[in-house]
Amino acid sequence: MEKLRERISDNDKVFRETLYQLLKSVVFPSCKEDNQGPFNSMMMVYIFNATTHLAGDVRLMAFKFFDLVVQHYPSSFSLYAEKA
């Protein structure tokens, strides 16, 4: 998963969309929320990084990844909301 999350800000739009679909349909549904603390923390780092990318389509896709994390792991979102 380390290599996949690094690709959230990949310049290839098709790859990002494929990664999103993979996370949405296979990875996130098969993972339990209580075991995802470190994984989600690092995932959020890459998502937040992608929101500052120079390419607009990468930034927009970052918010889709963020929404996906919020949908599958709402407790992860509350951790970041409390820090803000």
Image: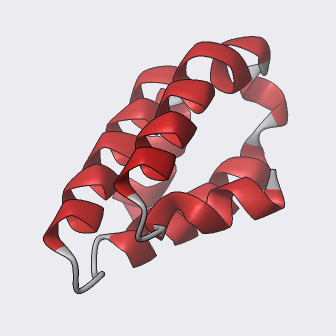
Q: Nearer the viewer, residue 26 or 13?
A: 13
* 10 horizontally vs 34: left or right: left
Q: Nearer the viewer, residue 45 or 82?
A: 45
Q: Position of residue 46 (x, y in %)?
A: 54, 68
Give the colour scheme of this rendering.
secondary structure
Image quadrant assignment for residue 64? top left
* 13 horizontally vs 7: left or right: left
Q: Please, which residue is most extreme toward the bottom here?
A: 54
Image quadrant assignment for residue 54? bottom left
Q: Nearer the viewer, residue 52 or 72?
A: 52
The residue sitting at 29% across, 51% down in the picture is 61
Q: Position of residue 38 (x, y in %)?
A: 79, 55
The residue sitting at 53% across, 22% down in the picture is 24
Is residue 80 placed above or below 22 in the rendered structure? below
Tally the marks: 0
Q: Position of residue 48 (x, y in %)?
A: 40, 70
The residue sitting at 50% across, 26% down in the picture is 21
Q: Please, which residue is most extreme toward the left here?
A: 56
Q: Position of residue 43 (x, y in %)?
A: 61, 57
* 41 horizontally vs 75: left or right: right
> In what quadrant of the picture does the C terminus appear?
bottom left
The residue sitting at 28% across, 81% down in the picture is 52
* 52 horizontally vs 50: left or right: left
Is residue 48 placed above or below 41 in the rendered structure? below
